[in-house]
Amino acid sequence: MGKRFWRIVATGFCFAVFGLGGLLILCFVFPVLRLFHADLQASQQQARRVIHKTFQWFVRLMVGCGVISHEVRQAEKLARHGLLIVANHPSLIDVVLLIALVERPNCVVKASLRDNVFTRGPVRGAGFVANTDGPQLLADCVASVRSGDNLIVFPEGTRSLEHDAPSPMKRGAANIALRGGLSLTPVVITVSEPMLGKGQGWRDAPRKRPHFILSVEDDIPMTSCFAPFAADEEEDAKAEESPVITSMARRLSADLGAFFAEKIKAQRASGCDSN
């Protein structure tokens, strides 16, 4: 009971630090960056570097406080630029762990986060892509990856309903890959104990310390049959509505869901320690 009580307190402390950090970034860090970088794109790239380093520090804080432990397998595969990273989403902190791992991070976030007082600083300052509907979202995602950003997408669209199995995949990541002719870089995330999953708050700390494993898998290339859809933005917007690309996106999403389910099952069968 004593360890769990401490974990609840430590988790609440980390949440408070995260929220305060978001406010400080909004009020002080990004205004300074804009003063030194008149160009919006340069300012956003610098903001992403700041967030990358800040999240690295925050992960160390969570580990040091005993809130989580974690390991990354085959992390060298993320030491590249221009990746379309797709991951399952068992916990609220998945995006923190991933952004801490990759340089030039970008991610697709809920539009509501742009207005949240604690998150709008990083989201707006870094120019993260909001998950609004329409061809412009997909065009922005493709352009981000082609410019050298590492774009993080959770194909489930929200946190998994179960911490040890992915929810059905939406077609967003598949559409981005198809339209841009982009390979997918899957990251399989497992956690030994449910933590900050769907419907869980920071007070619901588990009895044992959750151990996160992030396994970076081999790239999944788009086959040649998808190549015709790697056209310019205008043609992509038209192709998005075509029955052919809709069918391909549906099939690719289903295959991606099966891929993650199989990898999660195998990873959990091999052991996922907590302490």
Image: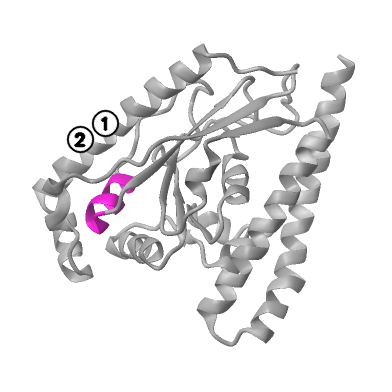
Q: In this view, does 110 lie to the left or right of 210?
A: left
Viewer-proximal residue among 159 and 214: 214
Is residue 178 within the magenta segment? yes
Residue visible at 53% across and 61% down? 104
Callout 1 amino acid: Ala
Q: In this view, does 114 lie above or below 205?
A: below
Q: Quadrant of residue 171?
A: top left
Res. 251 mark: 2
- Under circle 1, the secondary element is helix
Most frequent secondary structure within the magenta stretch: helix
Q: Do the residues labelled 2 and 1 touch (CB within 8 Å)?
A: yes
User: Can residue 118 be seen in the rendering of this structure?
Assistant: no
Where, quadrant-wise, is the C terminus in this rendering? top right
Res. 139 mark: none
- Tell me residue 2's x, y (percent): 90, 17
Q: Name the residue under label 1.
A: 254
Residue visible at 57% across and 66% down? 126
For the residue carrying disc 1, how many other residues have a C-alpha within 10 Å: few (<14), some (14-19), or many (20+)?
Answer: some
Q: In this view, does 186 lie to the left or right of 21?
A: left
Callout 2 amino acid: Arg
Where, quadrant-wise, is the N terminus in this rendering? top right
Residue positioned most to the right: 2
User: Can residue 222 be seen in the rendering of this structure?
Assistant: yes
Task: Work out how far the residue at label 2 is from the one at label 1, CA to CA, in angstroms.
Answer: 5 Å
- Under circle 2, the secondary element is helix
- Tell me residue 13's x, y (percent): 83, 41
Q: In which quarter of the image is residue 196?
A: top right
* Magenta segment: 172-181
Residue visible at 54% across and 41% down? 75
Is residue 169 within the magenta segment? no
- Tell me residue 198's x, y (percent): 55, 30
